[in-house]
Image: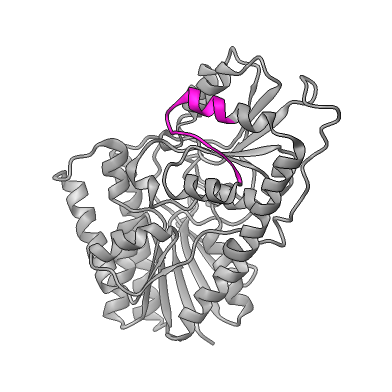
């Protein structure tokens, strides 16, 4: 029986908030009679707190649907400062120790190591062990680090941290046996930096969990008692630019439209304070991946919001977008490039410029004013796209066929 080690510091199980891609991949491989051992931290990226380990635990190992899941202790942090660097390095140190014990002391035979970004130091540690012990290495590129740091924060190319991350990035691209990208248009970026054997396997929902549903009942039209419900689920961070949404909501507060933000993050308190005088915004606590489908079903549209950052035009694959496709909800996006183009070309919702409240407000009004039949057609086209391209089953099967070559 083949054994794969999966590494992602912020991998989650469906009972937690956040992305579950590594869980879904691992569960699929278990069903294909592979042994899967996964290594992650239980420190929540969005909530900035520990979810699994008690105060004195160094590691906790659970068996979850056949997956041997290792939760590793790391240094905690609240803000994106030097402590975040220590957080990543502590995960690397812990991961190195565990790998050393398993490979040297217990002589584990591993067929493939599969590491996921954006945590480049952890992926690089996994690469080193793969080369020392001659284990095939797969590198999954979720976010294009360090380019996103340069574009988002204007960090200087000559910054020591950026230069170090660029070195790790190039080594990972050069020495990986296979590279998995979530965004198709990031392929040329990676190839220009020495990558080869690049495979496009985007994010996508399990269509058995995210079932198609017709739009919720509207009665005789939208009103204060039954507003047009726009749902955003996910992180409330700087890059999500939800303050842009708050400003747009202020421009259309006279209409029966309600924005519902579900999730957590470092900007949430500021957003609540900024919208305290608005009655068309509601903030809810994070919910688990299990509960996302039943929540989206009650929405009239799904919002996908990101800041105007060059790398987002070609290097992003947002889960919440494909979840909306699967359930059949029109989408509202602020992501120029690949995402907006797809929504426009297939007529799946409305698009607008990022960082422009007036543009967002106008797009929301445009969708709000469409007939139910037009919005339903958007939802049906979205579901078809999910079935043909973004189905988790299709994506996992392609990955499995790649892995079999190295088993």
Query: In the drawing, does residue 228 fall left or right of residue 148?
Result: right
Please tell me whether residue 358 belongs to the stretch shown in magenta.
yes
Percent from the top left, x then y, of residue 212?
A: 74, 54
User: Residue 110: x percent and y percent?
Assistant: 42, 81
Q: Is residue 138 left or right of residue 161?
A: right
User: What range is drawn magenta here?
Assistant: 348-363
Which residue occupies 28% across, 78% down? 131
**Residue situated furthest left in the rendering:** 158
Q: Is residue 242 above or below residue 173?
A: above
Q: Position of residue 358 (x, y in %)?
A: 49, 22
Task: Please tell me how many numbered marks the rendered image carries.
Answer: 0
Percent across and percent down for residue 115 are 40, 66
Q: How is the image coloured?
A: one colour
Membership of 168 in magenta stretch: no
Residue 6 in sight here: yes
Of 211 and 156, the residue lying toward us: 211
Residue drawn at the location 50% of the way across and 71% of the way down: 37
* Residue at (37% x, 63% y) in the render: 95
Q: In the displayed structure, would residue 3 be above or below residue 38?
A: below
The residue lying toward the viewer, choosing from 277 and 188, is: 188
When the figure is inspected, residue 100 is found, relative to residue 209, above or below; the finding is below
In this image, 211 relative to 186: left or right?
right
Q: Is residue 93 visible?
A: no
Which residue does the image show at 53% across and 60% down from the upper left? 21
């Amino acid at each position: 029986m083949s054994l794969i080690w999966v590494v992602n510091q912020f991998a989650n199980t469906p009972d937690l908030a956040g992305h579950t891609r590594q869980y879904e991949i691992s569960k699929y491989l278990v069903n294909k009679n592979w042994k899967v051992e996964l290594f992650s931290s239980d420190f929540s990226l969005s909530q900035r707190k520990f979810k699994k380990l008690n105060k004195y635990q160094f590691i906790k190992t659970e068996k979850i649907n056949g997956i041997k899941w290792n939760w590793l202790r790391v240094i905690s942090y609240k803000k994106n400062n030097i402590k975040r660097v220590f957080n990543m390095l502590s995960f690397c140190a812990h991961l190195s120790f565990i790998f050393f014990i398993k490979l040297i002391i217990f002589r584990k035979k591993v067929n493939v190591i599969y590491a996921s970004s954006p945590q480049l130091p952890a992926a690089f540690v996994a690469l080193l062990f793969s080369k020392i012990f001659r284990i095939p290495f797969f590198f999954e590129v979720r976010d294009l680090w360090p380019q996103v740091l340069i574009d988002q924060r204007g960090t200087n190319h000559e910054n020591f941290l950026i230069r170090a991350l660029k070195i790790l990035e190039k080594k990972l691209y050069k020495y990986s046996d296979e590279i998995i990208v979530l965004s198709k248009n990031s392929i040329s970026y990676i190839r220009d930096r020495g990558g080869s054997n690049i495979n496009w396997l985007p994010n996508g929902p399990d269509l058995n969990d995210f079932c198609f549903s017709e739009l919720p009942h509207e009665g005789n039209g939208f009103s204060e008692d039954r507003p047009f419900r726009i749902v955003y689920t996910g992180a409330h961070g700087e890059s999500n630019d939800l303050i842009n949404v708050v400003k747009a909501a202020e421009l259309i507060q006279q209409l029966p439209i309600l924005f519902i933000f579900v999730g957590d993050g470092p900007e949430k308190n500021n957003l609540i304070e900024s919208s305290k005088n608005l009655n068309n915004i509601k903030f809810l606590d994070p919910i688990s991946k299990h509960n996302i489908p039943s929540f989206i079903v009650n929405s009239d549209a799904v919002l996908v919001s990101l800041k105007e950052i060059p790398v987002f035009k070609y290097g992003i694959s947002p889960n919440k977008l494909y979840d909306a496709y699967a359930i059949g909800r029109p989408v509202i996006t602020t992501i120029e490039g690949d995402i907006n183009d797809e929504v426009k070309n297939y007529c799946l919702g409305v698009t607008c410029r990022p960082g422009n409240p007036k543009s967002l407000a106008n797009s929301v009004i445009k969708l709000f004013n469409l007939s139910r039949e037009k919005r339903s057609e958007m939802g049906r086209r979205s579901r078809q796209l999910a079935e043909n391209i973004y189905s988790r089953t299709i994506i996992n099967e392609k990955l499995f066929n790649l892995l079999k070559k190295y088993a």
